[in-house]
C-alpha cells in the first residue's frame, strides 16, 4: 500500500513538473526574430541606405557620431551598406540631407538613385554624459524602399558605461578605479559609445544575404523591441 501511495506521489510530481516546464517554454514574453521582424524575412533586403540621424538633442555631435559608426554592425549582420560618407555627400548636393523630410514620404527616389532595397532611419532622443558614462535614447527603424513599410523598428534606452574596473575590493583599489574612470572618460571619444550603442541595437536584426545565418535565424531568441539596458 505504501509503495502504491509513493508511486502515485512521484507520478504526480513528475506530471506537475512537466506542466510547469511547458508553461515556461510558451511564455509570451519570449520572442523570436521571426515574430518581431517578420517583414524583414518577407522583404529580404540586401542593399541598405543609411539616412543621417534625426537629432532631437542639444548635443550637435551626436548626429555624426551615430552616422559614422553604423556601417560595421549592419555589414557584419550580412547587408551591403552603401557607404555613409559617399551617400552623405550625394544627399547634401541634392538637398536631401535632412532625414526628417523623408520619414513619411515615398522612398522610390532612393531606390532609383542608389539601388537600395531599404532605408535606415534613426532618431536620437538623448545623448548626455552622466557620471562615467553616457545616457542614450535611440530609435532605429528601417523602411522598405519599395513599399514604404517599416520592416524593422527598435528603440533602446541605454547607459553606456565607460568606467574602469580593476576588480579590486580594497579602498586603494576603489580610489584607483575612480581616478582611472575619470581619466578614461575624459580621454575616451564619444565614438566608442556610439559604436557600442549601434552594435547593441542591431544585435537582433535578422541576418542578411552575406551572413552565414541568412534564412536560418527566424527562430533565434530576440530581446524586446523597446529595451532599457546598461552596456559596459
Image (tube, rainbow, N blue to C red):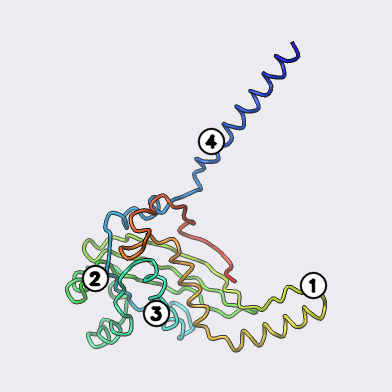
Marks 2 and 3, how far apart at CA:
17 Å
Q: Nearer the viewer, residue 168 or 61?
A: 168
Q: Is residue 26 above or below residue 228?
A: above
> Residue 60: where, in percent of width, then height?
45, 86
Label 1 crowding class (10 Å Cα cut-off): few <14, some 14-19, many 20+? few
Mark 2 or mark 1, whichever is nearer to me: 1
Q: Secondary structure at mark 3?
A: helix
> Residue 225: where, in percent of width, then height?
45, 58
Q: Which residue is mark 4?
A: 22
> Residue 91: where, in percent of width, then height?
26, 83
Nearer the N terminus, badge 2 or badge 4?
A: 4
Label 2 crowding class (10 Å Cα cut-off): few <14, some 14-19, many 20+? many
Mark 4 or mark 3, whichever is nearer to me: 4
> Residue 157: where, in percent of width, then height?
52, 67
* Left or right: 71 as drawn, with respect to 45: right
**Quarter of the rendering occupied by the N terminus:** top right
The residue sitting at 24% across, 70% down in the picture is 116
Marker disc for residue 169:
1
Q: Which residue is mark 2?
A: 116
- Tag 1 and tag 4, C-beta contact below 8 Å: no
Q: Secondary structure at mark 4?
A: helix
Marks 2 and 1, how far apart at CA:
53 Å
Label 3 crowding class (10 Å Cα cut-off): few <14, some 14-19, many 20+? many
The residue sitting at 32% across, 61% down in the picture is 150
- Tag 2 and tag 1, C-beta contact below 8 Å: no
Q: Quadrant of residue 5?
A: top right
Marker disc for residue 67:
3
Amino acid at each position: 500500500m505504501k509503495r502504491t501511495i509513493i508511486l502515485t506521489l512521484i507520478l504526480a510530481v513528475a506530471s506537475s513538473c512537466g506542466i510547469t516546464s511547458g508553461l515556461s517554454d510558451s511564455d509570451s514574453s519570449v520572442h523570436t526574430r521571426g515574430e518581431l521582424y517578420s517583414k524583414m524575412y518577407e522583404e529580404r533586403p540586401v542593399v541598405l541606405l543609411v539616412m543621417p540621424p534625426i537629432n532631437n538633442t542639444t548635443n550637435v555631435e551626436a548626429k555624426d557620431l551615430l552616422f559614422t559608426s553604423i556601417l560595421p554592425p549592419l555589414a557584419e549582420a550580412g547587408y551591403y551598406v552603401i557607404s555613409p560618407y559617399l551617400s552623405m555627400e550625394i544627399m547634401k548636393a541634392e538637398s536631401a540631407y535632412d532625414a526628417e523630410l523623408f520619414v513619411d514620404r515615398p522612398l522610390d527616389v532612393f531606390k532609383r538613385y542608389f539601388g537600395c532595397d531599404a532605408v535606415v532611419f534613426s532618431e536620437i532622443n538623448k545623448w548626455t554624459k552622466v557620471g562615467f558614462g553616457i545616457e542614450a535614447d535611440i530609435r532605429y527603424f528601417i523602411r522598405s524602399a519599395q513599399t514604404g513599410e517599416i520592416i524593422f523598428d527598435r528603440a533602446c534606452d541605454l547607459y553606456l558605461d565607460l568606467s574602469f574596473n580593476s576588480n579590486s575590493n580594497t579602498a586603494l583599489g576603489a580610489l584607483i578605479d575612480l581616478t582611472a574612470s575619470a581619466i578614461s572618460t575624459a580621454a575616451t571619444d564619444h565614438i566608442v559609445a556610439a559604436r557600442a550603442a549601434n552594435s547593441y541595437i542591431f544585435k537582433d536584426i535578422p541576418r542578411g544575404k552575406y551572413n552565414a545565418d541568412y534564412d536560418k535565424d527566424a527562430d533565434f531568441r530576440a530581446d524586446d523591441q523597446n529595451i532599457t539596458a546598461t552596456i559596459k
